[in-house]
Image (cartoon, helix red, strand yellow):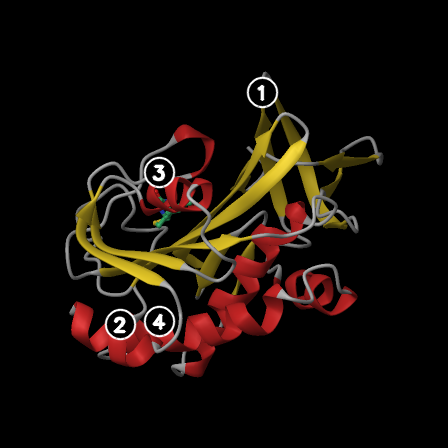
């Protein structure tokens, strides 16, 4: 993915491309502070300190993934919707390339054949009580080889099911779907698109939240995106955020 091909494909969009960075989310944050407009994207071929959710790292060898971060300026009342935007747009972009059995694992992993094909890291940036903006980071496994790694059974690369993929074509589809959904961030349509794609509803789950693990059956989601868990005593508990394991233990 050369800068020249990117320039031709992205046209008027503000973007910055790097062969190697620390984290695209961190660069996008710097750019946000410097006045970047909504829709600007930072793209990298390799991240040496890529970040995942819950303080974890995220790494893919050069040439194997599509990694980008989009600057957004949502209203503070809907900034919690940014991760929904990422999940839905990635699902739709993968489907545009012919992938099927694409869905979401709450809160925002994208699944392909129930294996993780993409992670989404949405971060809101505030100065005191003023929202400066949000960064939507996405890392899509295009041709990462997970054989022999701890992720061999739980992760998947897009090309495993679609055959060869041009990352620039994937990027073009993804940006089109992000542009489609980023204006109606507050809409019922976006929430419904996200909710309808959650594939683990009805499954036994265990969610690690700070010092406790909440187990039960994933029963649904609330309008603000919390997961509803039916516990063994029959009660429903809303979990706003956490790390979800399938199987309930
Ligand atoms: C997760 O599943 O834990 C989220 C992973 C998010 C990874 C992407 S790659 C591009 C962007 N920059 C980062 O440092 N992280 C996100």
- Identify the residue under disc 4: 171
Point 22% across, 50% down: residue: 60
Q: How crowded is mark 4: few (under 14 residues within 10 Å), some or many (20 or more)?
A: many
- Identify the residue under disc 2: 167
User: From what the image shows, is residue 134 above or below residue 94?
Assistant: above
- Between the C-alphas of marks 3 and 2, the distance is 21 Å
**Disc with the residue nearer the chain's start (4 vs 1):** 4
Say if mark 3 contacts mark 2, CB within 8 Å: no
Asked whether residue 94 appears in the rendered view, the answer is no
Quarter of the C terminus within the rendering: top right
Queried on whether the Cβ of the residue with tag 1 lies below 8 angstroms from ligand 1, the answer reads: no
- Identify the residue under disc 1: 210
Say if mark 1 contacts mark 3, CB within 8 Å: no
Say if mark 2 contacts mark 4, CB within 8 Å: yes
Quarter of the N terminus within the rendering: bottom left
Queried on whether the Cβ of the residue with tag 3 lies below 8 angstroms from ligand 1, the answer reads: yes
**Disc 4 element:** helix
11 vs 100, nearest the viewer:
11
**Disc with the residue nearer the chain's start (3 vs 4):** 3
User: Could you tell me residue 91's position as x and y percent?
Assistant: 50, 68
- Between the C-alphas of marks 4 and 1, the distance is 35 Å
User: Could you tell me residue 141's position as x and y percent?
Assistant: 30, 59
Left or right relative to 69: residue 105 = right
């Amino acid at each position: 993915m050369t800068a020249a091909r990117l320039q031709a494909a992205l046209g008027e969009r503000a973007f910055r491309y790097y062969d190697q960075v620390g984290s695209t989310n961190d660069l996008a944050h710097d750019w946000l502070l410097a006045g970047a407009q909504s829709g600007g994207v930072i793209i990298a071929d390799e991240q040496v300190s890529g970040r995942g959710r819950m303080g974890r790292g995220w790494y893919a060898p050069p040439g194997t993934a599509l990694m980008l971060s989009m600057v957004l300026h949502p209203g503070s009342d809907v900034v919690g919707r940014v991760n929904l935007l990422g999940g839905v747009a990635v699902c739709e972009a993968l489907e545009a390339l012919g992938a099927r059995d694409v869905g979401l694992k709450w809160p925002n992993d994208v699944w392909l054949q129930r294996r993780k094909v993409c992670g989404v890291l949405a971060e809101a940036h505030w100065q005191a009580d003023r929202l400066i903006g949000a960064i939507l980071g996405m890392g899509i496994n295009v041709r990462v080889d997970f054989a022999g790694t701890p992720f061999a059974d739980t992760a998947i690369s897009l090309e495993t099911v679609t055959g060869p993929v041009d990352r620039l074509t994937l990027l073009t589809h993804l940006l089109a779907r992000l542009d489609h959904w980023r204006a109606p961030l507050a809409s019922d349509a976006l929430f419904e698109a996200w909710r309808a794609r959650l594939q683990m509803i009805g499954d036994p789950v265990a969610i690690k939240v700070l010092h406790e693990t909440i187990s039960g059956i994933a029963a649904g989601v609330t309008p603000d995106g919390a997961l509803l868990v039916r516990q063994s005593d029959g009660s429903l508990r809303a979990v706003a955020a956490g790390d979800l394991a399938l199987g309930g233990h």
